[in-house]
Every structure is written in C-alpha cells, then in structure tokens.
Image: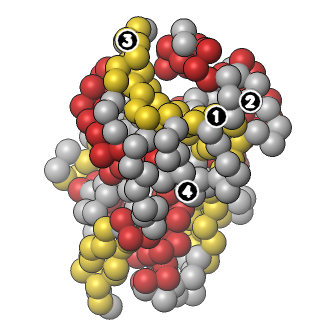
C-alpha cells in the first residue's frame, strides 16, 4: 500500500461515504473503501485500477460528472496542477470536506496553503513521512476551464514559429526544455515514413517533425492525459495533424515504425523511475522496421548507450551539449 493510502486508512472512519480519490496510486485503497471512486489521468495507473476495480475509476483531465460528497487529492508534483485540481474539486463541494494528502518530500506542508482560499485548513495526521490535511469548503469557487490555464510559447523553426500550448503538470510547462531544444537542432537525416514521438508532453517534437515533413505520419504517445490534451492543442494551434495516443509505455505504441524520436522520462513524481525508458530501449526493436531509427536525447550522465547496443544495434552519439547527448541507433 502506498504510504499516503496508509495515512488515509489511519482515519478510515472519515472516508466511508461517497468519496472521490483524485490522482490515487494504483494500490488496494479502492478495495478498502467500498464507497470510494477514483479519478486518474495516468494511463498506467488507470489500467491497473480498472482491471482490479472495474468501472470505479474515471480517466481524463476533467472531474467525473457524478456527484461525490467528499474528495481527497493525492498531491501531484506541479503546483499549478494542484491548483487546477483543487479548484475542480472545491467547486463541487460547498459545505463539504476536501482532503489533501502527500509526502513531506513532495512539499505537502507548503501545498496545504493552497487550501486556504476555500476555508481554514487543518492538519489531521502526520505519519509514514506524509501529512493529511482537511478543509471544509466555505466558499466554493467558480469552476476554472482547463484550457484557460494553458501556457503558450513559440519555437523558431525554419518555415516559421511553432506554437506550443502546455497545460498544468505537463513536462517543462511554458518553456522549451534544453534537451528537447538540442534534439530539435538534430533532426536532420531522419528516415521518412511513420514517426513515433514517445513521451510527447506538449507535443514539441512531433509537431516540429510534422511541420518540417508534412508527408510523414506522426504518432504522439504519452501516459499522462494532460500531456496528450496539450499535444492536441499544440497540433490545432499550428494546423497540423497527427495521431495522439494516451497509453503506458512502448507497449501502447504501433509497430512497423520508421523512427522513434524521444526525450524519454526519467522522473515519476518525486521518485526516480527509469522503468518506462528501459522498457522502451529493450523493446524499440519490436516497434521499428528493419533499418528504422531510434533518436533520443538524454542527460549525459545516463548510461543508455550500452542498453541500446545490447537490444537494438550500433549506437552513435550524434551531438552533445549543455549536459545532454543525442543518441542515434538503427535496427540491424
Ligand atoms: C522528458 S518529458 C518529454 C516531453 C516532450 N517530448 C518534450 O520534449 O518536451 C517525458 C514525457 O514522457 C512521459 N511519460 C512518462 N512515463 C511514460 C510512459 N510510461 N509512457 C509514455 N509516456 C511516458 C511524461 O508524461 C513526459 O511527458
């Protein structure tokens, strides 16, 4: 059981009514709280929860339509995503209870201040390196539209500026990441055909490729529904078309690809997690055509080259700068 769930269960009597567990971990909590439902935007967690507790978890960037009498938010990493989610929940909870739970190292103490617009927040418990906070919503806010919270920026590309639209919680929200920038400078000699932008975030890489090569088929994939919603907004803002998939890891990607282009994930929440990237490197071969190419940017300290060579083929460092490296490997 996730430590945050354990902290909730120390006060289980508070959570027996109709409860919305928002951003919940994929653990046993729904099995323990029979009247609770979940809301997730992480395709992997959602799939795991839905397999075990069929129909009890809602997936997407918007709160479920069904009523709930109280809600718990599991503190996400980004402050502006926390704001969006607290607003979405508090706007539905006039006179009712809103709880916030999170790990100390994730900043729960500071995040609890984000409850203050709704009423006087109280710390209910502190255990397992986590804290549980509660507020009775005295002044329910108006619902804020998710798209109104988008940040917009532009990237200079040959052929004109590319507009990027990023939603709260999306990687490198509101600015171009330095690793992604290096990859954008190294898009020459890409094979044509079908390209996968793995871990597309706000859609920077896939949209740039589609702009440069309108005849290429581009598929964008991310595990996070806020990321894929951003990628769709980015495509629309530039009048571009691509397939956008919300799914967990390379297993959710199409096969017979000509290119996998990626700035792959290496953090999940506050925990370092290379699993999705290692799985990508191990299985890229199954998703690439013979002669297809993996082109990837990573922090120079990450030792990806031997893993790529073991599973795919000869891996060259194509460029290096600002602490990042561009790797390039073809399926032999
Ligand atoms: C380093 S960011 C890159 C985002 C974007 N491509 C860019 O260059 O700005 C990595 C992305 O991988 C996504 N991601 C993390 N785990 C994933 C998984 N299991 N499957 C697919 N995408 C994942 C994250 O949500 C994040 O958007």
Label 3 SS: strand
| Marked residue nearer the N-terminal end (1 or 3) | 1
Q: Nearer the viewer, residue 323 or 66?
A: 66
Q: CA distance from mark 1 to mark 3?
A: 21 Å
Which numbered tag is attached to residue 19?
1
Depth-wise, is mark 3 or mark 2 nearer the camera?
2
Q: Is residue 296 above or below residue 34?
A: below
* Residue at numbered disc 4: 61
Q: Tell me, yes or no, if residue 67 can be seen here.
A: yes
* Residue at numbered disc 2: 35
Q: CA distance from mark 4 to mark 1?
A: 18 Å
* Residue at numbered disc 3: 126
Q: Are marks 3 and 2 in contact (CB under 8 Å)?
A: no
Q: Residues within 10 Å of mark 4 (few under 14, many from 20)?
A: some
| Marked residue nearer the N-terminal end (4 or 2) | 2
Q: Position of residue 18 (x, y in %)?
A: 69, 34
Label 2 SS: loop
Q: Tell me, yes or no, if residue 268 can be seen here.
A: no
Q: Quadrant of residue 254?
A: bottom right
| Marked residue nearer the N-terminal end (3 or 2) | 2
Q: Quadrant of the N terminus?
A: top right
Q: Position of residue 281 (x, y in %)?
A: 54, 41
Q: Residues within 10 Å of mark 3 (few under 14, many from 20)?
A: some
Q: Is residue 57 above or below residue 262?
A: above
């Amino acid at each position: 059981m996730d430590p945050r769930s354990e902290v909730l269960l120390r006060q289980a009597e508070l959570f027996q009514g109709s409860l919305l567990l928002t951003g919940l971990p994929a653990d046993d909590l729904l099995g323990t709280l029979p009247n609770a439902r979940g809301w997730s935007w992480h395709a992997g967690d959602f799939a795991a929860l839905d397999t075990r507790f069929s129909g009890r978890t809602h997936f997407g960037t918007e709160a479920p339509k069904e009523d709930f009498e109280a809600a718990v938010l599991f503190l996400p990493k980004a402050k502006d995503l926390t704001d969006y989610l607290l607003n979405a929940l508090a706007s539905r909870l006039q006179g009712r209870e809103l709880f916030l739970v999170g790990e100390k190292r994730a900043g729960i103490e500071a995040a609890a201040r984000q409850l203050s617009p709704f009423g006087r927040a109280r710390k209910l418990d502190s255990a397992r390196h986590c804290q549980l906070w509660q507020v009775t919503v005295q002044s329910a806010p108006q619902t804020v539209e998710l798209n109104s919270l988008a940040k917009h920026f532009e990237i200079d590309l040959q052929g004109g500026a590319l507009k990027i639209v990023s939603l709260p919680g999306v990687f490198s929200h509101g600015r171009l990441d330095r690793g992604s920038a290096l990859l954008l400078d190294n898009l020459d000699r890409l094979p044509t055909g079908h390209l996968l932008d793995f871990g597309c975030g706000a859609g920077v890489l896939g949209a740039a490729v589609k702009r440069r090569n309108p005849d290429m088929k581009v598929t964008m994939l991310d595990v996070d529904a806020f990321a894929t919603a951003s990628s769709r907004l980015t495509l629309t803002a530039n009048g571009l078309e691509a397939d956008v998939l919300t799914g967990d890891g390379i297993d959710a990607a199409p096969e017979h690809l000509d290119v996998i282009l990626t700035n792959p994930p290496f953090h999940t929440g506050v925990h370092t997690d290379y699993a999705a990237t290692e799985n990508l490197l191990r299985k890229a071969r199954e998703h690439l055509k013979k002669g297809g190419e993996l082109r990837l940017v990573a922090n120079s300290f990450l030792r990806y080259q031997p893993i790529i060579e073991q599973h795919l083929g000869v891996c060259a460092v194509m460029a290096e700068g600002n602490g990042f490296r561009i790797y390039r490997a073809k399926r032999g």
